[in-house]
Structures are given as structure tokens and as C-alpha cells.
Image (tube, helix red, strand yellow):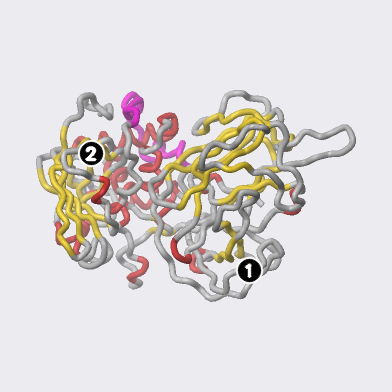
Amino acid sequence: MSTSMNDTYLPITGICLISRPHNLPTGYHCIRKVFDDPSRDADLMANSLLERKDRFLCITRIFPLPGNRTLVLEDIKLINERDAPPPNYFGILETVDTKAKGTAKRTICVKLVERQAGIKCICDIIFLYRSKQPPHFYTLIGDINGLQMCVKEGTVPPFRVSPSVPSSETSSNLYPNPMNEQSYYGSQQHYHTSENLYSNTIPKTIDEKYILEGIPFVINPKYLSENRNGVRISSTKSSNVGQQNHNHRFSDIVGEPRRMLLPIQGYEKMPLVSLEEAIVPLVSLVPDVEQMVWVAKQNSNGPTDGLSSDESASIILYTMEWEPYEKSFYVILNSTLRATIREQLRPWFLYLRLVINALEKLPSTTRTVYRGVKADLSTQYSRGSTIVWWGFSSCTLSIETLNNERFLGKTGIRTLFNIESYSARNIRSHSFYAEEDEALLLPARHFEVVGCLDQGNGLHIIQLKETQPKFPLIKLSSS
């Protein structure tokens, strides 16, 4: 069982130790080998003179849909064996397959929290043997049994509820009480087993000894017939309304960090290259990006506003929504722009140079733009406070667009942002979905919260005014 590089930006939702790799819990991935030496086992327990003691860490990134509640791994620490775990952490003290002691001298302590879009999480774990320097995007945690433990941080992406699909019941001696209803979530990885091709089991509650109680999981069958990465482009030409959800860019707000990050810089020193060249460093990070670039280029013949075909296509590529949307180009890009570790942006430098250069060619005037999300964010935006949106921000020039239920709608809990911006660019002529009247804000925009209004009927209105920060938060090509 292996895990794809394209899935390592998804949050880890379960973690455990096993003694024997063939006892791998269903739906889990065993970290069997060290990252920098595939010939060496990532064994976390030293052998004694009389017996071999194997310990391997296992993780899963799958989460259940019922109730839209699950856990994510927020943090992980290594402590001395005799020390007490930090508050809100608990140690993995034994293996789930043999109930043997977990590790010696060092204890792995984990902090799991309820899943919420935008919070910090751990997306991947690796072990190094030869190197003391973690690879790009990873942070060194500490030493355990002569191996360097490293983690990759990220943020929990927004998620959507999918309808349950009928399937046969599965059972496991690890989980005596599986739920009868099975559900799917299209963006999660799928594993092959001989008994049930797409059945998995995932954690749902914290246990101080192990985190393996779970429920059955089945991948949405509609994704099984897609290309090698299960990716499609969402298009208005589809007659199925359920496939027209190309509006998530307008609600991509909840993932914004509530803290000041380091400025975005370095990309402006890169040369201007073709879009095909700009995405070469991203091939392993974004599924099917080469195919999507080809589609974008086919839609950028004779562009307006004095843009080249590559410049227009770079904007089109940003607006395109993959299915499932969590694998979209803009989702992964914005998640990286919001990450604490700026080194993670390096593979995106060529693309950022191209697309920001293109956007700066478009006229910008002070105007009011709108975006919204089907959630109550009013407590996060107090009047008089200042905030930064670190990712690109998709807005609409027409508030009428948000009336559509695929955007903000007219019922339920909602937050509407009324934004006075001096830097918004009208990209309607360079969007894959021209009917959305989209205006795009550059990354690292600084705002003052001018006012908040509880309109009633579940609607909260937040008025923002774009302002200049004391120091630039992004190094623009023209500056």
C-alpha cells in the first residue's frame, strides 16, 4: 500500500504503531522505509540481544462524512519516555496489532482536534537516516531510534458533504461495531484490497492507547472511471447541476490564517517563461496540471487587454476547478500561500512571476467587489481590526451573482463580504467561467474591518476596506 505525493497536502486523520507490517490496519499507510534510504526500514524500536522488535508508524488521511465530524492531527512531539505528555497531547504507548510497548526511550505524542477548515494540521510524516537536514516543505521534530522524524505542515481544506452511496457491509476484527451506512468523500485516497476494492476504515474518536475505532468508507463510484488521478474539469456545459460547482473560489476564505506571516518574495526575481515551463516544478504537486495547462492554452487564443497567450492562460488556469475541487490548482496554490514555511512556495515561483505579471497589466481602479461563504465568520472580523488575505481572492463585480444557491444563496447561515478595493482586477475576459463576472485580488491583501451587520435570516454582512500595510507583504514585479 502506498500513498501518492498528490495526497500529502491532505491532513492526517489517524495515526498508530504496529509491530508487524502485514498487520496494517485497513485504510492506513505504513511508513515502512526511511525517506533518504529506501533500503533501510523506518523501524522505531531498537532490537534487544535476544529478539527483534519492530515498530512502524502508520497514518491515514481518510475521514468520514456522517455528521461532518472527524479528527485531524494538529501537532506531534517527541518526548523522553519518562516525561508526561504536554497538555492536550497523548502518547502512543502500544501497538494496535500486538499490544506491545510502543517505543523505547522516546515517546511519540500527538494532538488530535476536531476537523475545521483553515486550522493548522500535519499532512505527512517521514524519517531520515543519512541526512540531518529535512527536505523542502518538511520540519525536523527530533530523533527516535537513530532516525530523524520530520513532518509536513499544512492547513485543513474546506470540504463538502457528498450523498451516501449504497454498498455492501464490510467488517474487520479491529472494528467490531461498524456503521451500517457507508459514505464517500471524493477527494480522499483509495486503497485496493482483495475483499472490497474501495473499502477503508477510519478513526473517529480519541483513545489514549490507540486511534483505530472507525467506520466504513467507500470512494464515490463516479470517480473510478476518470483519468489516472481521478480529476475532471468542472464545466457549465454539463447538464448535471451537481457538476457545476465551479464556485468554490468565491468562498475560499475560511482557510486564511489569523496571524501575520512572512512576506511573499523571491518569485519576482524569476524570469518570465511560457506557462508550460512555469508549471514544470508543479507536476508532482498538482494532479494533471499539464493536461489542464493544455486546456487553458486552447482557451487563450487572441486574448484581450494586451496580454500574451501565456499570460491569459495563466489566469484561466487559476480559475479552472478540478473535480474533486480539492485537487484544483488554485486550492493547492492558496494553501501554499497561507503556509507558515515560505520555502514551500519555491516550486510556484515561475508561475507566480507569470500570473502576477499578467494581472498587473490589467487596469485596477477603486471599486466594490463581493464574495461570500455559507458560514458565520462574523466573530473573526471585529470592527476596527485589520486582517490579511494571503491567498488570491476571487470576488464578483455583481452582487447578483451571489444570489445563486451555488454561490451564497438566499437562505441559511451566510457571510457576505462587501469589499472596497483599489487593486481588484477584472478577469472576466481571462476566466474559464466568464459568466461569473470575476474580479481577482492579488495575494497578501491588507484590509480594515469597517463594519459588521447581522442582517437576520442567517445573513452576516462584513464591510472591508483595502488598506496599505506599514511594510509591503508581497514583492510585486513592478515595485
Mark 1: give few (<14), some (14-19) or many (20+) Cα within 10 Å.
few
- Give the percent coordinates (x, y) of residue 211: 61, 52
Q: Nearer the viewer, residue 325 or 385?
A: 385
In-image side of 98 versus 247 (left or right):
right
Is residue 275 on the magenta stretch? yes
- Give the percent coordinates (x, y) of residue 325: 40, 56
* Nearer mark to the viewer, of 2 and 1: 1
Residues at marks 2 and 1, CA–CA distance in whole angstroms: 54 Å
Q: Which residues are magenta?
A: 261-283
- The residue sitting at 38% across, 46% down in the picture is 118
The residue sitting at the right extreme is 50
Mark closer to the chain start, 2 or 1: 1
Circle 2 sits in a helix, a strand or a loop, which is it?
Answer: helix
Residue 33 position by quadrant: top right
Visible residue check, residue 363: no
- The residue sitting at 39% across, 50% down in the picture is 117
Task: Classify the position of the C terminus by image quarter.
Answer: top left
Residue 384 position by quadrant: top left
- The residue sitting at 46% across, 36% down in the picture is 281
- Give the percent coordinates (x, y) of residue 400: 15, 61
Q: Nearer the viewer, residue 416 or 177?
A: 177
In-image side of 392 versus 410 (left or right):
right
- Label 1 sits on residue: 177
Q: Nearer the viewer, residue 222 or 175?
A: 175
In-image side of 378 versus 90 (left or right):
left
Is residue 128 on the magenta stretch? no
Q: Specify the amino acid type for callout 2.
A: Leu
Q: Is there CB contact under 8 Å for labels 2 and 1?
A: no
Circle 1 sits in a helix, a strand or a loop, which is it?
Answer: loop
Q: Specify the amino acid type for callout 1.
A: Asn
- Give the percent coordinates (x, y) of residue 234: 36, 60
- Label 2 sits on residue: 359
